[in-house]
Image: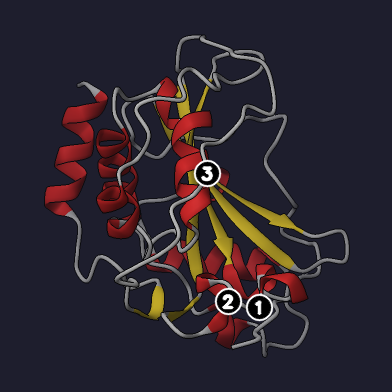
């Protein structure tokens, strides 16, 4: 099965609403178009063996004072829980593919159409150029695949979990698995800040876009680790 076929199948089977991860969201009619991105590393064209979907916990990101006025953090266009950081192709061994092409650039229509999933215009362009260009021919195809996977997921109520005494990473992982019973623990990685606050959940997929075990060398934080979740909403 090709990645295009798998993505279309996931899109057809995905439950609605597609943007359920946002507490609320209205894409802005106008936004400042992002500047063309510049590579921050070498071009690396290697075969794709698997994928990672990275979902950020938005309130943690929005703790930074410099981000308070952005679409993601201002509250003017929506309030966000988990948001899509990116869909990343991985290699079988060694460093992942990256920066395969800077063109074509995402159109304003593509950017606006994905702002309730990834509410940062420049990040939409960056993720396409660094990661998406190594797995799809166009930004439209890349974000169709990203959206298909995103829509197939149901995220736990991290706000409610944050109020739980003695919260651990295992509690969060189990909450995700309860909402997504076709996933297993070894396919879900949790990323924390150095101070132990939730930053991201990484989901591992095989070449066929089906859930797969994460790399044994990098399975994130263990279940026993204490966890803090910043609400800030």
Q: How far apart in space, not on screen, are marks 2 and 1 (Cα)?
A: 5 Å
First in sequence: mark 1 vs mark 3: 3
Q: Quadrant of the N terminus?
A: top left
Q: How far apart in space, not on screen, are marks 3 and 2 (Cα)?
A: 20 Å
- Circle 1 residue: 68
Disc tally is 3
Mark 3 nearby-residue class (10 Å; few <14, some 14–19, many ≥20): few
Secondary structure of residue under mark 2: helix
The furthest residue to the top: 46
- Circle 3 residue: 35
**Residue 87 appears in the picture as rendered:** no
**Relative to 231, is 148 on the left or the right?**
left
- Residue 186 position in % (x across, y down): 57, 43
From the viewer's side, name the closer residue of 20 and 126. 126
Residue beneath the point at 25% across and 52% down: 109
- Residue 32 position in % (x across, y down): 45, 60
Q: Which mark is residue 79?
A: none
- Are the two marked residues, 2 and 1, in contact with CB atoms closer than 8 angstroms? yes
Residue 112 vertical position relative to residue 68 in the rendered view, above or below: above
- Are the two marked residues, 1 and 3, in contact with CB atoms closer than 8 angstroms? no
Residue 118 vertical position relative to residue 66 in the rendered view, above or below: above
**Relative to 219, is 80 on the left or the right?**
left
Q: Quadrant of residue 146?
A: top left
Secondary structure of residue under mark 3: loop
Mark 1 nearby-residue class (10 Å; few <14, some 14–19, many ≥20): some
- Circle 2 residue: 73
């Amino acid at each position: 099965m090709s990645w295009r076929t798998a993505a279309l199948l996931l899109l057809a089977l995905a439950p609605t609403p597609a943007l359920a991860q946002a507490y609320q969201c209205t894409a802005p009619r106008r936004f400042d178009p992002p500047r063309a991105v510049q590579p921050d590393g070498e071009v690396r064209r290697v075969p794709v063996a698997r994928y990672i979907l990275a979902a950020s916990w938005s309130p943690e990101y929005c703790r930074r004072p410099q981000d308070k006025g952005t679409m993601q953090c201002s509250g003017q266009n929506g309030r966000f829980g988990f948001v899509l950081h990116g869909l990343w192709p991985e290699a079988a061994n060694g460093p992942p593919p990256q920066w395969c092409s800077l063109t074509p650039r995402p159109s304003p229509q593509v950017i606006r159409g994905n702002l309730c999933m990834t509410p940062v215009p420049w990040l939409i362009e960056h993720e396409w150029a660094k990661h998406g260009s190594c797995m799809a021919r166009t930004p439209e195809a890349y974000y169709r695949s990203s959206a298909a996977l995103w829509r197939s997921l149901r995220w736990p109520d991290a706000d409610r979990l944050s109020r739980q005494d003695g919260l651990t990473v295992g509690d969060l992982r189990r909450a995700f698995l309860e909402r997504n019973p076709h996933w297993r623990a070894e396919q879900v990685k949790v990323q924390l800040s150095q101070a132990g606050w939730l930053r991201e959940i990484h989901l591992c997929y095989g070449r066929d876009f089906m859930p797969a075990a994460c790399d044994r060398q990098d399975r994130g934080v263990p279940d026993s680790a204490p966890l803090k979740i910043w609400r800030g909403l």
